[in-house]
Image (cartoon, helix red, strand yellow):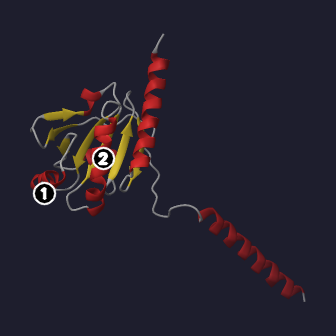
C-alpha cells in the first residue's frame, strides 16, 4: 500500500512540474528572440542611396526621430507593407525621417520594385549586410524606431499595419518631446 502512495505522489509531482513548465510557455511566441538593442544607441552607418548614389548617414538625422525599414524585393510581406510605409512617410514625414534599407538583395531587383511601387522616402543599399547585422535583422521586413537622440525605442517584426505605425510614431514623438524637455536647463 505504501508503495502505491509513493508512485501516486511521484506521478502528481511530475504532472505538477509539467503544468508549471507548460504554463510558463503559454502566451509566448516560441520564435520570439529578445531584442537586445532596445534602449541602446542605434548603430551608426553610411550607405549609398539607390536613387541618387549619394551617401546617406544616420548621423545626418540626429535630432530627429528615424524609422528604418529593412526589406527585399524577394520578400512578399515587404511588398505588401510598402504602401503602408509610403503612406506613413507622407503622413508623418514632418515628425520622423523614414529610411528603407535593402536587405540581401541586388540593386537591380530593388530598383525594379521601387519603380513598380514608388518610393516617397530614401532607399539605401547595404551591399555586405553589415548594417543589417549591426541591427540584428533576422529576417525581413523589420522596422526600427529610433528617437531624436539616437536611441532605439523598439522594432516591429513582420509587415507593419497603419495603426501600429501610427502608434509607434506617436511613441517616438512623445519620447522625443520628453528628451527635448529634459535636455533644457
Nearer the viewer's eye, disc 1 or disc 2? 2
The answer to the question of whether label 1 and label 2 lie on touching residues, with beta carbons closer than 8 A, is no
Vertical arrangement, residue 160 with respect to residue 30, above or below: above
Of mark 1 and mark 2, the one earlier in the sequence is 2
- Residue extending furthest toward the right: 1
**Depth check: 135 or 79 in front?**
79
Q: Residue at x 18, y 43 (%)?
A: 124
Q: Position of residue 8 (x, y in %)?
A: 81, 83
**For residue 8, side relative to residue 174 (left or right):** right
- Total number of numbered discs in the rendering: 2
Q: Which residue is mark 1?
A: 109
Give SS at disc 2.
helix
Mark carried by residue 85: 2
**For residue 126, side relative to residue 171 (left or right):** left
Q: Residue at x 19, y 53 (%)?
A: 117
**Depth check: 10 or 95 in front?**
95
Vertical arrangement, residue 28 with respect to residue 9, above or below: above
Amino acid at each position: 500500500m505504501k508503495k502505491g502512495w509513493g508512485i501516486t505522489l511521484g506521478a502528481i509531482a511530475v504532472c505538477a512540474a509539467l503544468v508549471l513548465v507548460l504554463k510558463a510557455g503559454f502566451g509566448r511566441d516560441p520564435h520570439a528572440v529578445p531584442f537586445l538593442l532596445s534602449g541602446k544607441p542605434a548603430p551608426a552607418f553610411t550607405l549609398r542611396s539607390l536613387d541618387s548614389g549619394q551617401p546617406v548617414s544616420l548621423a545626418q538625422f540626429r535630432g530627429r526621430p528615424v524609422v528604418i525599414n529593412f526589406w527585399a524585393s524577394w520578400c512578399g510581406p515587404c511588398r505588401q507593407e510598402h504602401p503602408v510605409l509610403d503612406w506613413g512617410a507622407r503622413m508623418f514625414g514632418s515628425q520622423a525621417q523614414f529610411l528603407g534599407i535593402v536587405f540581401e538583395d541586388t540593386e537591380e531587383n530593388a530598383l525594379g520594385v521601387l519603380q513598380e511601387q514608388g518610393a516617397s522616402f530614401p532607399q539605401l543599399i547595404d551591399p555586405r549586410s553589415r548594417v543589417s547585422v549591426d541591427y540584428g535583422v533576422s529576417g525581413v521586413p523589420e522596422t526600427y524606431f529610433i528617437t531624436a537622440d539616437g536611441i532605439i525605442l523598439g522594432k516591429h517584426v513582420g509587415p507593419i499595419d497603419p495603426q501600429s505605425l501610427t502608434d509607434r510614431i506617436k511613441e517616438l514623438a512623445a519620447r522625443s518631446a520628453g528628451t527635448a524637455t529634459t535636455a533644457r536647463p
